[in-house]
């Protein structure tokens, strides 16, 4: 794990909330020059601490208002079987999150789809193309009250 100082931690907290700030604005907030901020951000990207920048889109405003929380149970937990399933899930744009978990299910997925019919088609394909999936359970999300990808950074005060 790369060593992160207080400036790095503050920068990470800030850019997670607003990646559009200029290096001057970031520098003003953390007490560094714009060039120092630029060097730090470049290092954080090259070290893999920052894995990318994205625009967060409101699914309801682009025709994907339905969310599902899905539990998958697999027959065999052989590494190659799990790798194929992970690869399949990773290629599906409707599958937003994949968690390998303990408990009643082996994987927990967050899925978004424009309709229940589209979700049903996705799950039918999942079962047809992945014989290791024994069964799945679905929870339909009735409302979204918080949606974030923010990762709390230990050692930073609220910014």
Image (spheres, rainbow, N blue to C red):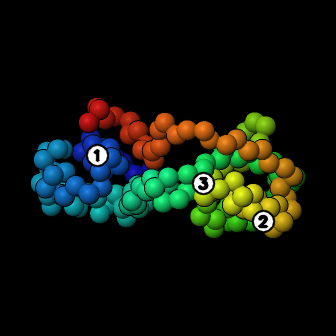
Q: Is residue 110 above or below residue 23?
A: above
CA gap between label 2 and label 3 equals 15 Å
Q: Which residue is mark 3?
A: 112
- Mark 2 nearby-residue class (10 Å; few <14, some 14–19, many ≥20): few
Residue 140 in picture, x, y percent from top left: 67, 43
Q: Which residue is mark 1?
A: 14
In the image shown, does 15 or 71 lie closer to the viewer?
71
CA gap between label 1 and label 2 equals 40 Å
Q: Which residue is mark 2?
A: 125
Which is closer to the viewer, label 1 or label 2? 2
Dividing the picture into quarters, in which one does residue 143 lie?
top right
Residue 28 in picture, x, y percent from top left: 12, 47
Sequence-wise, the earlier of marks 1 and 2 is 1
State left or right for residue 15 relative to residue 73.
left
Whether pointer 1 and pointer 3 mark residues with C-beta atoms closer than 8 Å, the reply is no
Q: What residue do we see at 31% from left, 61% from top?
A: 43
Sequence-wise, the earlier of marks 2 and 3 is 3
Sequence-wise, the earlier of marks 1 and 3 is 1
State left or right for residue 23 relative to residue 97.
left
Q: Secondary structure at mark 3?
A: strand
Query: Is residue 61 in view?
Result: yes
Q: What residue do we see at 79% from left, 37% from top?
A: 104
Q: Secondary structure at mark 2?
A: helix
CA gap between label 1 and label 3 equals 28 Å
């Amino acid at each position: 794990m790369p060593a992160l100082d207080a400036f790095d931690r503050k920068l990470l907290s800030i850019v997670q909330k607003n990646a559009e700030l200029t290096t001057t604005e970031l520098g003003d907030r953390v007490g560094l020059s714009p060039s120092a901020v630029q060097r730090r951000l470049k290092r954080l990207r090259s070290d893999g601490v920052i894995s990318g920048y994205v625009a967060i889109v409101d699914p309801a405003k682009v025709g994907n208002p339905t969310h599902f929380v899905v539990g998958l149970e697999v027959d065999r937990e052989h590494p190659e079987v799990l790798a194929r399933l992970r690869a399949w899930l990773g290629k599906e744009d409707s599958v937003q999150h994949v968690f390998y978990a303990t408990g009643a299910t082996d994987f927990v997925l967050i899925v978004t789809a424009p309709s229940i019919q589209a979700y049903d088609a996705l799950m039918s394909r999942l079962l047809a193309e992945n014989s290791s999936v024994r069964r799945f359970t679905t929870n339909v999300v009735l409302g979204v009250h918080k949606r974030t990808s923010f990762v709390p950074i230990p050692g930073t005060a609220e910014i």
